[in-house]
Amino acid sequence: MCPGRVSGTVVGVIEIQDLTKRYGRTVALDALSCAVRPGRVTGFLGPNGAGKSTTMRVLLGLDAPDAGVALVNGVRYASLRRPMCEVGALLDATAVQGARSALNHLRWLARTNRIGARRTIAVLEQVGLAGVARKRIHTFSLGMKQRLGIAAALLGDPPVVIFDEPVNGLDPDGVRWIRELMRSLAAEGRTVLLSSHLMTEMALTADRLIIIGRGRLIADTSVRELADRFPQGVLVRSPRVAELSGALRSAGAAVAEESGALSVRGLDVAAIGDLAAARGIPLHEVTPRSASLEDAYLQLTADTVEYGAAR
Amino acid sequence: MIDTIAAEWLKLRSVRSTYILAGVVVACAGAALLLAWYAARIWDGSTPEQRTHFALSDVAELVGWVAQLCMALLGVLAVTGEYGSGMIRTTLAVVPRRATVLAAKASVVGTAAFLVGVAIPLLTYALSRLVIGDRPIRGSSTPAPDEIRLLLAAGLLIAVFALIGLGLGVILRSTAGAIVTVVALWYLLPIVALNLPSPWNDRLTSVMLINLARELAGGHYETAAPQGLLSPAGALVTMLVYAALPLGAATLLIRRRDA
């Protein structure tokens, strides 16, 4: 589909160095540096207005940075002769002309980069739109447009893929489909950059997290590292709170009282259950606090919003 | 470049507005033929005295006049449709050489407008000859070589209109704004020029877009004194300047602006 590309030589690394971008007085990117590597899903996180979309537009040569560079495989995107074979991107699934059929939309895209017409059918099948290929795009739901945008990004079979908020407006099936697609693209050795403002979604999809706020890098970390930095707690309810609290403390846990329940750190659900059983203390609820990754993210980004910088 | 042109051709063919605009020109050709047929009937029922006062305007040229506006809109929509939907970002991402994108759009839109702008008026002319037959109606008995030369010049002007529409679409990035500007150039400005004090009325009227086809074909138009006319070469240069100015500005802007 992309003859002339020497497979194996493409590593698919995105490098962003000291990227600065201003729109009037607004500083969208403030000396942002980070790198995205192949073989895993990298989540690009930040609150609305953090600079995620701006970074992606600069990366694709659409907006010119005021300082710094964004490189794909060591070169600027704008210098690529057939960019679809190097980088596939979905910025805004609704930014398509509704009067055109899905197939015709992919056809003109394929033509610009000398990609064979057969490939358009293949990607439509891959995203599950083969049955509506000749339907006009304005009849599509948001989820179908997201699928079409992903099909367009995959046309050139690129080693690097970039998706801006691809799960926005999708139903649970669609969200799961995108999650599995991203993971399989990464498993094939591709570089996958996926932006979102939802930490919970990223926790399920990404291996690596780049968190930005106000155009600056806040954290470049793995999902596990981030979770470890903010230890998880367990919520426990019991009719004999005082007795249980003492027992947990003597077992080495940190216990805090929260409106009649206990917030326990340092012991996992099994240890708490065993301990309560051994003492004959009934438990009414034992809930691991799985939202702590989101808490960690909110805490990190809240800091930058308040103080402007900080890593 | 060839690939980008092919892609732009696919884009132009796959939206309904293209067919609607071409359809308006065809419908106008139908109306013009109806007019010719009606004129022929009146002619047949007229006395020789009445016939001396009877004239019919060049119906093929009338179709070309409507085609000027329709093909200018074709040029406008070829790019404002993308700005309006946001698809321009996809276009500029898959072809990062922006001047190439604009050149491809200009070739496709310009060629399509020229073909529509020559073929439909020419067909109108041929059919109107059949309708009118050998009736010597004033205004519709231009010799065929002269008429064909005029219609080719008019086709070139129609292509220039399309390129102006395209350039304005890129500059203004707004369908409404570009259409208003096109209509001003097509209709309002010639009226303003006509009402200026002499000699400015003749001078400006001679460089109004709608008069350039007749001047290029070496003919005349009714509203100006013969001494105010441009030479065919002058008319050609004026046409090229009309196309080059908006396209040049559009090239600078599309390369410099954030998409």
Image (tube, coloured by chain):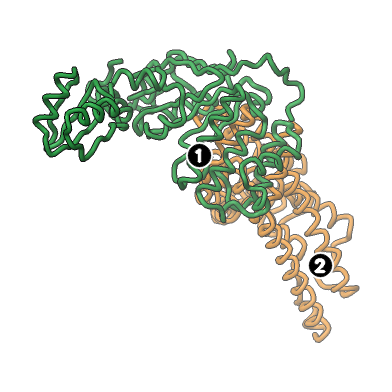
Chain colours: A green, B orange
* Residue at horizontal 30 percent and vertical 18 percent from the top: A229
Same chain for labels 2 and 1? Say yes or no.
no
| Chain at tag 2 | B
**Quadrant containing the C terminus of chain A in the rendered view:** top left
Residue A11 to residue A172: above or below: above
**Subunit under mark 1:** A
Q: Which residue is mark 2?
A: B140
Q: In the displayed structure, would residue A231 be above or below residue B81? A: above
Q: Examine the rendering and report whether any part of residue A159 can be seen.
A: yes
Front-lying residue, A14 or A278: A278
Q: Position of residue A287 (x, y in %)?
A: 27, 35
Classify 10 Å Cα crowding around label 1: few (below 14), some (14-19), many (20 and above).
some
Q: Measured from the top left, where is residue B53 in percent x and y?
A: 75, 77
- Residue at x-position 56% and y-position 41%: B87
- State the residue position of label 1: A92
Q: Secondary structure at mark 1?
A: loop
Q: Which amino acid, by three-letter code, is at mark 2? A: Ser
Residue nearest the observer in this picture, A69 or B169: A69
**Kind of residue indicated by mark 1:** Asp
* Residue depth check, mark 2 versus mark 1: number of the one nearer the observer: 1
Left or right of B127, for residue B98 = left
State whether residue B203 is above or below residue A77.
below
Q: Name the quarter where the N terminus of chain A is drawn.
A: top right
Residue A89: percent from the left, percent from the top? 56, 31
